[in-house]
């Protein structure tokens, strides 16, 4: 194997989810998307990465998002409270109130909006955390590219 940095990529992972974007006009209504996710990893050493293990982590994280209502935990415009004997989340956005079964919801820590950009950042944080624990000093850069429906795309790229 050459001694220069190697790029390894995995594409065509996907998930479907619902969300709303506070302050974005019609996108403030509850709606859903089909997302595709591309993960690119740059190596910095002449070692091999167990990509089956990495792909299992990617698929696990996407499965947690799949078929969920995604809520931003850090938004000052979204109130999330437990209700109905702890079985539902009561979500208030501006003048609207929703009640969702807890098993249908994923509250995303550290996220202010559930945009494609924020989802790329969120997935980067989750996957890079695993890479740091399981492949220390092997990975230099991790790219997460989220495509929302057809053509709307966001990328988050940072060192691991």
Image (cartoon, rainbow, N blue to C red):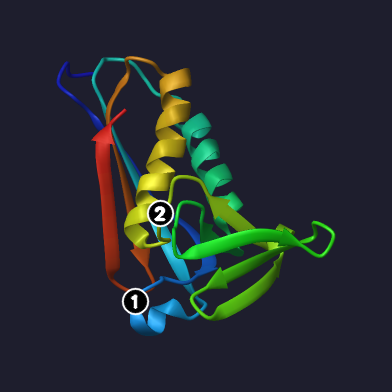
Badge 2, how many Cα within 10 Å: few under 14, some, many 20+?
many
The answer to the question of whether label 2 and label 1 lie on touching residues, with beta carbons closer than 8 A, is: no
Residue 39 to residue 128: above or below: below
Disc on res. 119 = 2
Image quadrant where residue 80 sits: bottom right
Residue 109 to residue 88: above or below: above
Residue 49: image location, x then y, percent: 40, 24
Q: Which residue is drawn at 18% across and 24% down?
A: 5
19 with respect to 102 (left or right):
left
Q: Residue at x 33, y 15 (%)?
A: 47
Instruction: Please tell me whether mark 2 sits on a helix, a strand or a loop.
Output: helix
Task: Single out the residue that lies furthest toward the left.
Answer: 4
Image quadrant where residue 115 sits: bottom left
Q: Which of marks 2 and 1 is nearer the N terminus?
A: 1
Task: Single out the residue that lies furthest toward the bottom.
Answer: 26
29 with respect to 107 (left or right):
left
19 with respect to 125 (left or right):
right
Image quadrant where residue 41 sits: top left
Residue matched to label 1: 24
Q: Distance between the residues labelled 2 and 1?
A: 17 Å
41 with respect to 129 (left or right):
left
Residue 141: image location, x then y, percent: 26, 32
Instruction: Please tell me whether mark 1 sits on a helix, a strand or a loop.
Output: loop
Quarter of the picture containing the N terminus is top left
Quarter of the picture containing the C terminus is top left
Q: Residue at x 39, y 85 (%)?
A: 26
Residue 155: image location, x then y, percent: 27, 52
Frontmost residue, 107 versus 6: 107
């Amino acid at each position: 194997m050459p001694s220069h940095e190697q790029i390894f990529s995995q594409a065509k992972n996907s998930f479907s989810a619902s969300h709303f974007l506070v302050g974005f006009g019609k996108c403030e209504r509850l709606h859903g998307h089909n997302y595709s996710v591309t993960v690119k990893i740059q190596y910095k050493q002449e070692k091999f990465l167990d990509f089956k293990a990495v792909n299992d982590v990617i698929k696990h994280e996407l499965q947690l998002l799949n078929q969920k209502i995604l809520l931003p935990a850090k938004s000052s415009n979204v109130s999330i409270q437990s209700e109905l004997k702890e079985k539902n989340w009561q979500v208030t956005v501006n003048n609207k109130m929703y009640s969702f079964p807890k098993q249908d919801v994923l509250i995303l820590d550290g996220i202010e909006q559930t945009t494609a950009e924020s989802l790329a950042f969120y997935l980067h944080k989750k996957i890079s955390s695993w890479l740091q624990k399981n492949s220390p000093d092997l990975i230099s850069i991790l790219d997460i590219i989220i495509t929302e429906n057809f053509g709307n795309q966001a990328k988050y790229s940072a060192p691991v």
